[in-house]
Amino acid sequence: AQEYQQVFPNSVNEVDGLLYLNSSNMIPYAIAGLKEMDSKVRELTRENQELKARNKEFEERIKALEKRTPK
């Protein structure tokens, strides 16, 4: 709570010497973080699909070249 209090002082309450977090104030930040992570996951998923497609093309080209190469 001490570290959180430095960033969000209005979200921490002290009662009898103990610090308590008001978690409802965290919700907008948590949602923003989730949106950012979702965007990154989508971006990486697209990139992964593209790389898989390129890899498949390369594998097919290698197989075609191997067929043409005398053994």
Image (cartoon, helix red, strand yellow):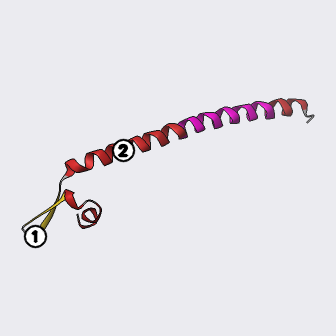
Please tell me which of labels 2 and 1 falls first in the chain: 1
25 shown above or below 7 = above
Secondary structure of the residue carrying numbered label 2: helix
Q: Please, what secondary structure does the residue beneath circle 1 have?
A: loop
Locate residue 31, reporting x and y percent: 33, 43
Q: Amino acid at mark 2?
A: Ala
Q: Which residue is mark 2?
A: 32
Q: What are the residue bounds of the magenta stretch?
A: 44-62
60 sits left or right of 65 in the view: left
Q: Residue at x 37, y 43 (%)?
A: 34
Compared across the picture, whether 54 is left or right of 41 comes to: right
Position of residue 43 measured from the top left corner of the image (x, y, whole percent): 53, 39
Q: In front here: 11 or 38?
A: 11
Q: Work out which quarter of the rendered image holds the N terminus and state it.
A: bottom left
Quadrant hosting residue 51 = top right
**Amino acid at circle 1:** Gly
- Of marks 2 and 1, the one in the foreground: 2
In what quadrant of the picture does the C terminus appear?
top right
Q: Position of residue 12 (x, y in %)?
A: 18, 60
Distance from the alpha carbon under mark 2 to that under mark 1:
32 Å
Q: Is 38 situated above or below 19?
A: above
Residue furthest to the bottom in view is 17
Q: Which residue is mark 1?
A: 17
